[in-house]
Image (spheres, helix red, strand yellow):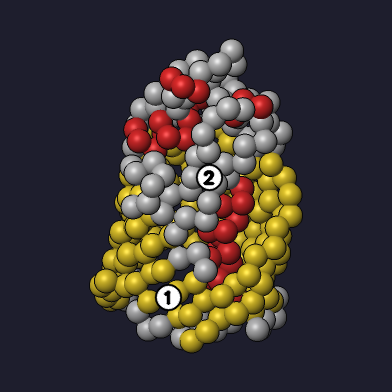
Amino acid sequence: MKTLSQWATAMVSGLVVSATALANEDETGWHLGAAAGYGYEKSLFKFDDDDSHGFFLPIIEYRGSWYSISLFELSADIYSVEEGDWGLEISTSFSPSYGQKRDENSSIFDGMDERKEASDITLSVDVTTPIGLVGADIAKDIGSAHEGQTASLYYQLPVYGSDNSALMLTTGIDYYSSDYVDYYYGVRTDEVNAQRQAYKGDRASSSYIGYIYQHQLTSHLSITHNLLYRSIPDEITDSPLTEKGEDTQLSTQLILAYEF
């Protein structure tokens, strides 16, 4: 699971930029700005408070006709076709690591090695239909973090759309390889103490449902609100690092973005 700060980063690099793009859709060239917001994420870990704080992140992106480059992601279209209400897009992206994966404020992590964020290369396939978008992606860590894989199958349903606003419902299933779960939620034999026993994580899957609302306030200013409600699998809740019975997680953000 991503921490709040990393999910915020992903939102700024994707949803916030797309919200600002309501005013200049498909415009190539530089897109510069900043995003500020407030977010909340329920913590899964023992002795840890829920994460709730403000954040500020820059928007620096260059969009080409078939690629984009930002601080948080490099992406490129491999193939795309559109016929009426139907469409197919195949793309790839790379998300570099920016350091530590989880906020280790809890005493449950005392004496444990730091767990780093993955450097993922991702292959995505999106199919646009008259009743929404169906997509799938698979990601591989090519860095020195968990070195495993994650995958997603998702559906996005536009509920409302106009020239300056959009509301979308989203649901899906995420898959995590055993390397991923063991790296972030496992306890190695040399990390055992009185608070945590050894634990080896296994592959797991998690379902989620939520919504994203975007509104273009002016030609430069946009606001985004999102909420995600996720199930937490036994392979994670069985970890001695997590609270027992914490089988769901709520995350939400309110983000204001300005593009010059």
* Mark 2 burial class by Cα count in 10 Å: few <14, some 14-19, many 20+: some
Task: Name above or below for residue 126 compared with residue 115.
Answer: below
Q: Which residue is mark 2?
A: 101
Q: Residue at x 67, y 68 (%)?
A: 35
Task: Name above or below for residue 247 compared with residue 206.
Answer: above
Residue 231 image position (x, y, % from top left): 50, 34
- Give the structural element (helix, strand or loop) at label 2: loop
Is residue 8 left or right of 170 when viewed as pictured? Answer: right
Camera sees residue 148: yes
* Mark 1 burial class by Cα count in 10 Å: few <14, some 14-19, many 20+: some
The amino acid marked with disc number 2 is Lys
Camera sees residue 129: no
Q: Residue at x 66, y 53 (%)?
A: 253
Quadrant in the picture for residue 247: top right
- Give the structural element (helix, strand or loop) at label 1: strand
Q: Residue at x 42, y 75 (%)?
A: 68
The amino acid marked with disc number 1 is Ser
Distance CA(mark 2)–CA(mark 1): 25 Å
Front one among 62 and 151 = 62
Residue 181 image position (x, y, % from top left): 41, 33
Residue 89 image position (x, y, % from top left): 31, 68
Task: Name above or below for residue 73 compared with residue 109.
Answer: below
Mark 2 or 1, which is nearer the eye? 2
Task: Name above or below for residue 249 compared with residue 221.
Answer: above
Q: Residue at x 44, y 24 (%)?
A: 188
Residue 74 image position (x, y, % from top left): 41, 69
On-image quarter of the C terminus: bottom right
Q: Which residue is mark 1?
A: 68
